[in-house]
Image (cartoon, rainbow, N blue to C red):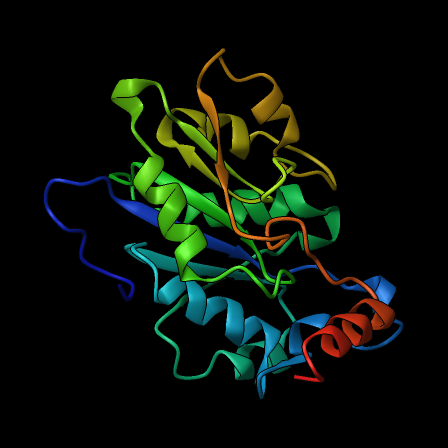
Amino acid sequence: MTAGGAVAGRPVVAAILLAAGEARRMRGRDKLLEAIGGRPALRHAAEAALASRADRVLVVLPPEAAPRREALAGAAVEIVVAADCTEGMAASLRAGLEAVDPGTDAVVILLADMPEIGSEAIDRLIAAFDPAAGREILRATAADGRPGHPVLFGRRFFGQLAALKGDRGARSVIAGAPAGSVRHVPIAGRAALLDLDTPEDWDAWRAGRGGS
């Protein structure tokens, strides 16, 4: 569903798309503006989130990001600026969480450079979320079981996520979670592991898809 308006009887979930990184390994190119099926990668990721069951889609951008904003023009996302994004991923996580409504039950953390993550992957995480049954962190895995992204976190972990510092993600929160609260959700193929950080990564991925 598009952002806005939770459905009664199920948890309220926000998707937070992290898109404030500097993409230093791209040697001057912005990986979030690389084309996927004729659309910028950032737009592709945002539209996947909007097509999911998430109730809101928040996109975290750096302060100076005019081309990335243009890539999102007309999309029903909410832009959040991470003023201190040079600190690293933790700053983007904090900015996204600060913009989440108090009544939100869970957030799905998405990376914008994972081109094979679609709405189905997000929906699988949302469907598996069940705090009453102890399923409070849902992590996507590749078909072979290797853990990757995206990851859903229930509300009880928001404080820990907001306390993270530096250029690291939420691995420490996952590692320190109570036994049984972290569940793996298989996603077809390697989508949960495939992130594209260099021009060579993008060229190889496109070659494997017939140039698209």
Outermost residue on the bottom side: it is 38
| Left or right: 93, with 7 as reference point | right
| Left or right: 125, with 19 as reference point | left
Task: Measuring from the top left, give residue 85's x and y in whole percent.
Answer: 67, 53
Vertical order, 47 against 212 (above or below) = above
Vertical order, 45 against 154 (above or below) = below
On the image, which quarter does residue 36 sit in?
Answer: bottom right
Vertical order, 187 against 11 (above or below) = below
Outermost residue on the top side: it is 179
Residue 30 visible here: no
Query: Split into 4 quadrants, where in the image is the C terminus?
Result: bottom right
User: Could you tell me which residue is drawn at 45 percent across and 15 percent down?
Assistant: 180
| Left or right: 206, with 17 as reference point | right
| Left or right: 50, with 89 as reference point | left
User: Could you tell me which residue is drawn at 41 percent across and 60 percent down?
Assistant: 119
Instruction: Please tell me which residue lies in front, 174 or 62.
Output: 174
Query: Split into 4 quadrants, where in the image is the N terminus?
Result: bottom left
User: Could you tell me which residue is drawn at 40 percent across and 57 percent down?
Assistant: 120
Instruction: Please tell me which residue lies in front, 120 or 92.
Output: 120
Number of numbered markers: 0
Vertical order, 117 against 163 (above or below) = below
Task: Measuring from the top left, give residue 24's x and y in whole percent.
Answer: 84, 63
Residue 154 visible here: yes
Task: Measuring from the top left, give residue 183's x and y in whole percent.
Answer: 47, 27
Instruction: Please tell me which residue lies in front, 69 or 143.
Output: 143
Task: Measuring from the top left, give residue 42's x and y in whole percent.
Answer: 57, 71
Instruction: Please tell me which residue lies in front, 78 or 138.
Output: 138
